[in-house]
Amino acid sequence: MSDVTTSGRRVSPLRNVVRLLGPPVAVGVGAVLLLQFVLARFQISGIIIPRPTEIFEVMRSEIFIEQIGLSVWQTWQATLIGFALGGGAGVLLGIGMNESKLMRFVFYPYVVAFQSLPKIALAPVFALWLGFGLTMKFSFAAMLAFFPAVIATLSALSTVATMRLEMATAFGARRGQLFMRISLPSAVPGIVSGLEISMAFALIGAIVGEFISPSSGLGQLLLTYSESINVAAEFAVLLVLMLLGVAQNKLLFGAVRLAARRFFEPA
């Protein structure tokens, strides 16, 4: 059944899908074909860069499909838990520091100090404290997701137009109303941008945790293929990671859109 636009013209769902996915898919296919041609033309060894056909052949194998299914779930589980904890805590702390000068005075120096640490080097410390299981992976992912969310939230709320707040205050708006009706809706784009980075960092944190963890996951699968010098399989896992990152991004935007309709749009 066709959809009807506000102008009265009917636009089929298939055309919408083609319009949204067509350009990026076309660019991706073109890049793959170009890479295949260059590697074949200059006879570059598959140990250095595997051909796309070799990567797709690996991805079609039953062994890879069996391994990748469980590994994706293990990694995504740690990523989503870590993002929910780290990103959520970061947004809350950013809101608190914006609303309270005392909180900002107390916590902001620590946020800056911890942000300057080489966090990847802390992975062995997390393993020592929490073991090598899921808890360590999502805790490390949460730590990486925390800081972008804090900074983005604080920055977005700090840039809300002061004139709008003063005008609403003059008309009798209370502090809670100012936050829910003006500050938060105005800051949503900036907060979402920070959460995008947080989600990507959470995935990186989960992978790093799996590098030092004997449990399953995409990180361990990468190490296994690396030790056996199966470069095509390594690239196949990296491709799956890229697709997982895109899926997470779309999931985040879908959740934000639903929340915006629920809380910010008038009935």
Image: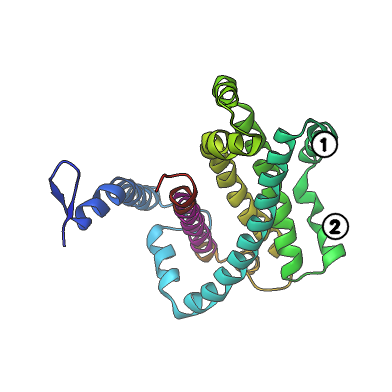
Is 28 in front, or is 43? 28
Q: Is residue 197 left or right of residue 125?
A: left
Where's residue 201, x and y in %? 63, 50
Q: Quadrant of residue 91?
A: top right
Q: Mark 1 sits on what residue?
A: 113
What label sits on residue 125 in the rendered view?
A: 2
Looking at the rendered image, the disc whose residue lies closer to the viewer, 2 or 1, is: 1
Q: Which residues are magenta?
A: 234-257
What label sits on residue 28 in the rendered view?
A: none
Please rate how many residues cluster around mark 2, counting C-alpha atoms within 10 Å: few if below 14, some from 14 to 19, many from 20.
few
Query: SS of the residue at dot 1?
Result: helix
Contact between marks 2 and 1 (CB within 8 A): the answer is no
Most extreme residue toward the left is 9
Is 140 in front, or is 150? 150
Where's residue 210, x and y in %? 69, 64
Question: At label 1, which amino acid type do we have?
Answer: Ala
Q: Is residue 77 left or right of residue 32?
A: right
